[in-house]
């Protein structure tokens, strides 16, 4: 099967043109036709010579951008889109409303192999990783749903760093000046702590921001909640984060899901504050969202935040959105929670 041309970066298109006996200088026009002009026919790319189109058509395909299978709108304005990609691989993306802007939350995989105990996506297991063009298709759909989309987060279904090559390509495609030219500094990639990719990102020229899911400060508890702790222990993850912050002179976003009676005790906040001491970070506290809909009020959320602030941590409560359509953090389950 021929590869989809939309899944190639501009540099890869240039290399492909050379291999086809064409000039690499046509890559910019090809890329712009695909990602800014919305070309649907490989035989007729705007401002691209017919000869070049024929050459590309001999080696690549250009599938139509997939449309969402289902669209749900929350009472708070959150919009959730369900895609069903090739091979019956479902994935959801979300448009989150904000005071001055909107954020697109994209999925990197159909399902997830990490198996975090609190996450509806993890309960599905991994169907497959998404291709760059499938990730780009989510962005394009979110763009059509939004009025002022200024932020992009890879915090949907899947572990982005376990599909890093495809996620990285999607980042390069979306940020390319001949395409959507979406600023990398407005993109955030979240991980449970895949250390080799944190290290790669540290050394790379990418300007995306890093977010790390802490989940629990005690190793035994974190291992029960997030099995990846056994492969990438949190202390080693945070050591990699410290190197990232130092090398890039950057802050990192840490995420902590508050599970009532599990990881929200005073001893947990004290251990967490000690563990992340000295890391230039913003800590987002996220109330647990049970699969399928809103959960009960978490009595310790604000007190947990106060304890962390008293310990010198920049701790914020994330305003959860879209829980009534199962679009909040940890609820994405490819539409299986809605009838």
Image (cartoon, rainbow, N blue to C red):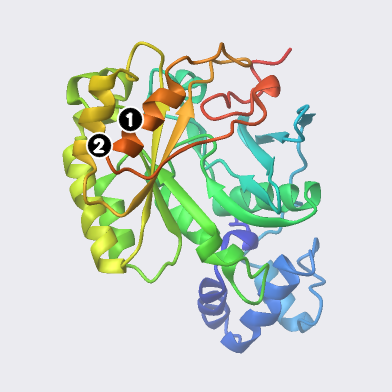
- Mark 2 sits on what residue? 273
Q: Nearer the viewer, residue 268 or 195?
A: 268
Name the disc covering residue 224, or none.
none
Quarter of the image for residue 273 reads top left
Q: Position of residue 6 (x, y in %)?
A: 64, 61
Q: Is residue 232 visible?
A: no
Quarter of the image for residue 20 reads bottom right
How many residues crowd mark 1 within 10 Å: few (<14), some (14–19), many (20+)?
some
Q: Is residue 297 visible?
A: yes
Name the side, left or right, on which 46 lies relative to 124.
Answer: right
Name the side, left or right, on which 67 lies relative to 60.
Answer: right
* 225 shown above or below 40: above
Mark 1 residue element? helix
Residue that appears at 82% across and 71% down: 44
Q: Nearer the viewer, residue 231 or 79?
A: 79
Residue that appears at 33% across and 30% down: 307
Quarter of the image for residue 199 reads bottom left
Asked if labels 2 and 1 touch by Cβ distance under 8 angstroms, the answer is yes
Name the side, left or right, on which 172 lies relative to 293.
Answer: left
Name the disc covering residue 307, or none.
1
Q: Nearer the viewer, residue 15 or 278?
A: 278
């Amino acid at each position: 099967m021929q590869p989809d041309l939309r899944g190639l970066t501009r540099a890869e298109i240039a290399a492909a043109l050379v291999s086809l006996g064409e000039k690499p200088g046509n890559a910019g026009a090809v890329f712009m036709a695909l990602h800014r002009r919305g070309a649907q026919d490989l035989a007729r790319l705007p401002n691209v010579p017919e000869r070049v189109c024929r050459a590309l058509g001999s080696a690549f395909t250009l599938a139509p951008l997939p449309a969402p299978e289902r669209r749900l709108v929350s009472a708070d304005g959150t919009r959730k889109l369900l895609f069903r990609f090739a091979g019956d691989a479902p994935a959801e993306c979300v448009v989150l409303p904000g005071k001055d802007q909107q954020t697109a939350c994209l999925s990197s995989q159909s399902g997830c192999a990490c198996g975090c105990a609190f996450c509806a996506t993890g309960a599905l297991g991994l169907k497959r990783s998404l291709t760059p063009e499938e990730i780009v298709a989510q962005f394009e759909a979110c763009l059509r749903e939004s009025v002022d989309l200024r932020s992009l987060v890879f915090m949907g279904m899947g572990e982005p760093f376990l599909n890093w090559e495809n996620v990285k390509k999607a980042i390069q495609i979306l940020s390319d000046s001949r395409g959507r030219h979406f600023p990398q500094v407005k993109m955030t990639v979240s991980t449970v702590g895949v250390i080799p990719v944190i290290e790669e990102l540290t050394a790379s020229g990418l300007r995306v921001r890093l977010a790390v899911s802490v989940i629990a400060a005690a190793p035994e508890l974190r291992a029960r909640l997030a099995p990846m702790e056994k492969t990438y222990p949190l202390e080693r993850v945070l050591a990699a984060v410290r190197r990232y912050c130092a090398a890039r002179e950057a802050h990192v976003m840490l995420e902590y899901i508050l599970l009532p009676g599990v990881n929200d005790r005073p001893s947990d906040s004290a251990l967490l504050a000690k563990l992340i001491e000295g890391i230039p970070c913003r800590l987002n506290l996220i109330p647990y969202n049970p699969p399928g809909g809103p959960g009960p009020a978490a009595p310790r959320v604000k007190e947990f935040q106060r304890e962390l602030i008293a310990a010198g941590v920049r701790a914020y409560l994330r305003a959860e959105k879209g829980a009534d359509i199962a679009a909040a953090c940890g609820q994405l389950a490819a539409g299986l929670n809605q009838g």
